[in-house]
């Protein structure tokens, strides 16, 4: 174990101090951007490396005020709590190596928020970037990432380390609040080649199984079952994800996790051709979260996939209208290439070939490697030529 505490931490006299606490492993590709954009806005950077082999340590030590190396403790919470134990700030903010908060304005929002009396914790907006070939291009979700630096506020859970229980307990005992602010940070850890994704997320599956098996409450067990389904999905084990979701008591999840879980169930079912199960959860999305375009899109996609165009076209039209309403914002961002592809399909079946050609081209503009759209475009372009010649 190595430990160092360089003497260049900076203090802002009139404000609470802020420490960035990180645990990292093999993040050489992304870490410097994260640290470079954070350094001007925090008094202290604490980094705990858990066994990197790609030179991450050298990057970390250039920026860290406190740096430590530990053996992986088989628990994300233990590692993250260790970084908190090394922190000297009034508040801790934590980011992963594949996170980044590049806009100084977002850091200023954090600084202003922790200067307000009574603030115990902050939810920030996590913006996830997803691979180009997926139905979703990304998502924006509130997540707790800033807490008062108090030894009673620590993480629990081997994998999806949770801190909210300790935050709530602290607020009840001492007063104070958890606030949500509009500061955004960006996460690219899901946008990885499949083999890298399997290596990164596959190790979490045994830990999640353990957490679900030994959960203290049925609500906590449901949470870990949901996260296990997510883990299976991340490593490409779609059938295992689907079977886990079929056993999941959705009613025991929080509202936020229910949104994610119904989305995953509908999306995975669509891919696995388990259409009845997928349709149930897509409709549940509309029922519980009518302000999100995703539910309408998934219902449309499942109907169209089964050749039920009349049932799907109304939902598809609703999706298009919602996505092109400038006054709306969404937590789930639908990949426009997939929307345009479905519209093109419906137009082609209805023999509206010029309209189909237009939307298949728009699909390929967004996603040039969409081979199915390219095949459709070739066929409908031939039909447009025939119609033009006949006229």
Image (spheres, rainbow, N blue to C red):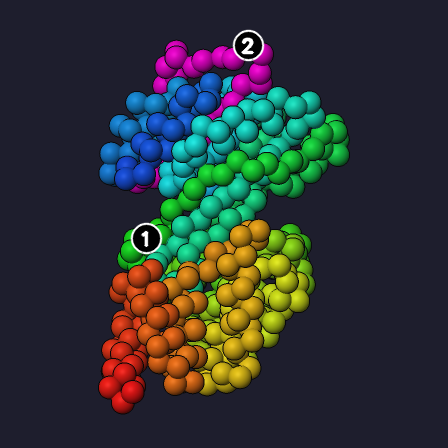
Which quadrant is home to the N terminus?
A: top left
Residue 135's place in the image compared with 150, above or below, is: below
Let me know if residue 13 is in the magenta part: yes
Residue 185, magenta (yes or no): no
Quarter of the figure that contains the C terminus: bottom left
Q: Secondary structure at mark 1?
A: loop
Residue labelled with disc 2: 13
Residue designated by label 1: 192
| Residue segment shown in magenta | 1-27
Asked whether, in this view, residue 378 is left or right of residue 213, the answer is: left
User: Front-most of 168 and 320?
Assistant: 320
Residue 217 is marked as none
In-image side of 58 versus 182 (left or right): left
Residue beneath the point at 70% across and 36% down: 169
SS type, badge 2: loop
Position in image of residue 120 (x %, y %): 65, 30
Let me know if residue 82 appears in the view.
Answer: no
In the rendered image, the residue lying farthest to the bottom is 390
Q: At x 65% / y 23%, what residue is drawn?
A: 116
């Amino acid at each position: 174990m190595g430990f160092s505490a360089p003497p260049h931490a900076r203090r802002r006299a009139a404000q609470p101090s802020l420490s960035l606490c990180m645990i990292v492993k093999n993040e050489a590709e992304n870490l410097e951007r994260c640290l470079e954009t954070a350094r001007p806005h925090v008094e202290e950077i604490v980094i705990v490396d858990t066994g990197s082999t790609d030179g991450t340590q050298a990057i970390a030590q250039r920026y860290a005020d406190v740096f430590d190396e530990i053996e992986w403790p088989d628990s994300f919470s233990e590692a993250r709590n260790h970084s908190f134990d090394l922190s000297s700030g009034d508040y801790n903010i934590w980011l992963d190596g594949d996170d980044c908060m590049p806009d100084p304005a977002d850091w200023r929002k954090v600084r202003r928020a922790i200067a307000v009396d009574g603030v115990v914790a902050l939810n920030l907006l996590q913006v996830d970037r997803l691979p180009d070939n997926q139905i979703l291009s990304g998502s924006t979700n509130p997540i707790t990432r800033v807490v008062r630096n108090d030894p009673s506020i620590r993480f629990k859970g081997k994998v999806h380390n949770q801190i909210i229980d300790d935050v709530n307990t602290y607020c009840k005992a001492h007063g104070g609040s958890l606030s949500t602010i509009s500061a955004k940070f960006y996460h690219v850890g899901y946008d990885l080649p499949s083999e890298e994704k399997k290596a990164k997320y596959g190790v979490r599956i045994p830990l999640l199984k353990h957490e679900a098996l030994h959960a203290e409450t049925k609500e906590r067990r449901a949470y870990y079952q949901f996260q296990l389904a997510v883990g299976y999905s991340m490593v490409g084990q779609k059938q295992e994800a689907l079977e886990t979701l079929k056993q999941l008591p959705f009613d025991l999840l929080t509202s936020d996790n229910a949104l994610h879980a119904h989305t995953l169930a509908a999306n995975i079912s669509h891919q696995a051709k388990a259409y009845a199960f997928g349709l149930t959860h897509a409709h549940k999305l509309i029922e519980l979260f009518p302000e999100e375009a995703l539910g309408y899109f998934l219902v449309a996609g499942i109907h169209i996939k089964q050749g039920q165009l009349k049932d799907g076209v109304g939902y598809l039209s609703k999706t298009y209208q919602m996505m092109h309403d400038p006054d709306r914002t969404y937590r789930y961002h639908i990949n426009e290439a997939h929307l345009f592809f479905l519209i093109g399909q419906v137009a082609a079946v209805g023999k509206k070939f010029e309209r189909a050609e237009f939307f298949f081209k728009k699909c390929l503009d967004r996603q040039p490697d969409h081979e199915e759209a390219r095949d459709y475009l070739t066929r409908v372009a031939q039909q447009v030529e025939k119609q033009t010649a006949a006229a």
